[in-house]
């Protein structure tokens, strides 16, 4: 997955509140599935990349937990774009 694709994915997930930090949700699993569907569609439309929801979910967790430097770079790019 290229850096630009990861930035796009992180942008969508942050704007949609994927991590659920902003309140109790009645059905968080369904909510996260809908958000991830948006990510899959947007990546396919913008980059022609077909990835499954599970692949993207795994990539997101890897970014946050294991790849701290990459995650910081993505956050910096997103902050500059505001």
Image (cartoon, rainbow, N blue to C red):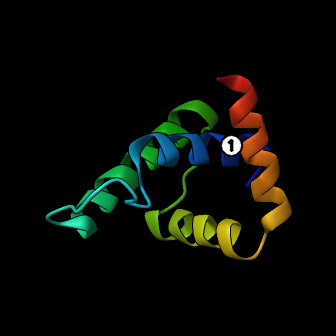
Image position of 34 with respect to 44: above or below:
below
**Compared to 13, does 81 lie above or below?**
above
Decide: is 42 above or below 21. Answer: above
Q: Quadrant of the N terminus?
A: bottom right
Q: Residue lying farthest bottom?
A: 66
Could you say which quadrant of the image residue 29 lies in?
Answer: bottom left
**Residue lying farthest left?**
26
Q: How many marks?
A: 1
Q: Nearer the viewer, residue 55 or 33?
A: 33
Q: At x 54% / y 52%, what residue is drawn?
A: 50
Question: Which quadrant of the view contains residue 24?
Answer: bottom left
Q: Residue at x 17, y 66 (%)?
A: 27
Q: Is residue 8 left or right of residue 30?
A: right
Q: For the C terminus, which image quadrant?
A: top right
Counting from the top left corner in percent of width and height, residue 22 is at 35, 53
Please name the residue that numbered disc 1 is placed on: 7
Crowding near the residue tagged with mark 1, few <14, some 14–19, many ≥20 C-alpha atoms within 10 Å: some
Report helix, strand or loop for mark 1. helix
Identify the residue shown where x is 28% and y is 57%.
23
Q: Give the camera-side residue of 41 and 35.
A: 35
Q: What percent of the width, then of the height, locates residue 3?
A: 78, 46
């Amino acid at each position: 997955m290229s850096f630009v694709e990861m930035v796009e994915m992180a942008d969508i997930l942050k704007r949609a509140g994927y991590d659920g930090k902003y309140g109790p949700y009645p059905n968080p699993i369904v909510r996260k599935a809908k958000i991830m569907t948006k990510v899959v569609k947007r990546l396919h439309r913008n980059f022609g990349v077909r990835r499954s929801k599970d692949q993207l979910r795994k990539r997101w967790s890897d970014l946050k937990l294991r790849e701290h430097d990459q995650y910081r770079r993505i956050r910096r790019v997103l902050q500059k774009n505001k």
